[in-house]
Image (cartoon, helix red, strand yellow):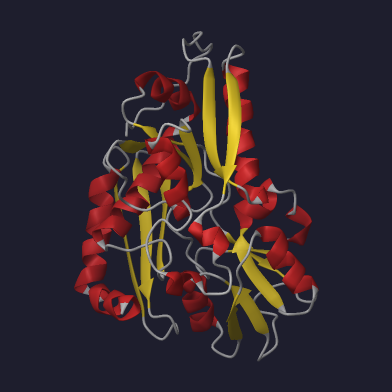
């Protein structure tokens, strides 16, 4: 992926007349795809952009915790297959769901400007995570969140919560949970700002790799489409997410393991914080480092090596069993 985002004042008229976006059919995925559709059509008035909805394995298996479903790319494989077959041209992903490796012939061409990377605390009775009474039931689908919440509040009950955003909110409203933890970006994109009681700080729950950012995947050979969609790239977001993903790749971590990675740009440098935890939160390994924003890969690998030196491999091996 190129590091330098192109920000033209006026996009040239392309020879490509239609772009088909592969999208999951959840409300959030469709919002994301239509958001990219609108941005492309505004940039290229002669362009027609179609959203093609499809269902992924991760959408179909809702009665099993994500970590037990197994496999990487639970939410992207079917979209990638449609790209390879030529049925669609680009796929819009939540970066936190995107595996570290891509099938031959496909690439991640763009990372767009990041929304909030943080987790959101949602409850109908309580204002903050700290205010939950002992024994309260908290819902999350993420081992990363589970481990960090358990470390903060070992007196809480953490239960698996699957389904799309609307389904999860409905389960909270039905009284199945005292609180749930979701990605703040997803709630904001769907207009649920009023449901957010607390934006959970990185100190309490370090975000997932890529959380809050959208990525666009396409065929490597489609150079004109790549040049067109590169106009949507955000340099700072790309650098930060590249550092996070390099760390995760070195750890050989999937999207559903208790690994966190969060980078921010400070001047010409990136500051990357990362964590590997046991599911129960009893063991939490942390590392952070700063490095040039122009070399996010090296920074990510440096932080991963520090975690491996602390014993991260053993923790992850136990989870993958």
Quadrant position of residue 45: top right
> Can residue 184 be seen?
yes
Residue 116 vertical placement versus 128 (above, below): above
Q: Which of 19 and 43 is in front in this view?
A: 19
> Can residue 197 be seen?
no
Figure disc tally: 0
Q: Nearer the viewer, residue 317 or 64?
A: 64
Indicate left or right for 186 with 227 as reference. right
Q: Which residue is drawn at 23% across and 66% down?
A: 306
Q: Which residue is drawn at 43% across and 80% down?
A: 279
Q: Quadrant of the C terminus?
A: bottom left
Q: Which of 133 and 26 is in front in this view?
A: 26
Quadrant position of residue 221: top left
Indicate left or right for 176 with 5 as reference. right
Residue 70 vertical placement versus 110 (above, below): below
Q: Could you say where residue 187 lies in the image, as x and y percent from the top left?
A: 68, 54
Quadrant position of residue 315: bottom left
Indicate left or right for 86 with 161 as reference. left
Q: Could you say where residue 189 lies in the image, as x and y percent from the top left?
A: 67, 46
Q: Could you say where residue 93 lies in the image, as x and y percent from the top left?
A: 50, 45
Q: Could you say where residue 282 lies in the image, as x and y percent from the top left?
A: 41, 86
Q: Which of 180 and 30 is in front in this view?
A: 30
Indicate left or right for 308 with 187 as reference. left
Q: Residue at x 33, y 32 (%)?
A: 3
Q: Quadrant of the N terminus?
A: top left
Q: Which residue is drawn at 46% across and 54% down?
A: 97
């Amino acid at each position: 992926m190129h590091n330098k985002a192109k920000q033209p004042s006026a996009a040239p008229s392309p020879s490509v007349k239609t772009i088909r976006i592969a999208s999951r059919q959840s409300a959030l995925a469709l919002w994301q795809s239509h958001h990219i559709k609108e941005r492309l059509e505004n940039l290229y008035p002669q362009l027609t952009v179609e959203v093609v909805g499809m269902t992924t394995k991760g959408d179909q298996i809702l009665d099993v915790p994500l970590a037990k479903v197994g496999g990487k790319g639970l939410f992207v494989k079917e979209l990638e297959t449609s790209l390879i077959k030529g049925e669609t041209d680009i796929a819009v992903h939540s970066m936190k769901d995107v595996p570290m490796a891509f099938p031959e012939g496909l690439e991640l061409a763009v990372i767009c400007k990041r929304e909030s990377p943080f987790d959101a605390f949602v409850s109908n009775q309580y204002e903050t995570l700290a205010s939950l009474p002992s024994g309260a039931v908290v819902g999350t689908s993420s081992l990363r969140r589970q481990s960090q919440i358990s470390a903060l509040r070992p007196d809480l009950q953490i239960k698996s919560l699957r389904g799309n955003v609307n389904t999860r909110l409905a389960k909270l409203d039905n009284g199945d949970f005292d609180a749930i933890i979701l990605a703040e970006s997803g709630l904001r994109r769907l207009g649920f700002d009023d449901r957010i009681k607390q934006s959970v700080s990185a100190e309490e729950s370090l975000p997932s790799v890529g959380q809050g950012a959208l990525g666009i995947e396409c065929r490597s050979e489609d150079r004109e489409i790549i040049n067109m969609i590169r106009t949507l790239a955000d340099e700072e977001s790309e650098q930060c997410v590249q550092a996070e993903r390099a760390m995760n790749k070195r750890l050989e971590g999937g999207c559903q393991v208790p690994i966190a990675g969060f980078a921010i740009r400070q001047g010409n440098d990136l500051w990357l914080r990362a964590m590997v935890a046991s599911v129960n939160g009893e063991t939490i390994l942390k590392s952070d480092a700063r490095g040039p924003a122009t070399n996010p890969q090296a920074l990510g690998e440096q932080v991963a090596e520090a975690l491996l030196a602390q014993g991260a491999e053993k923790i992850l091996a136990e989870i993958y069993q």
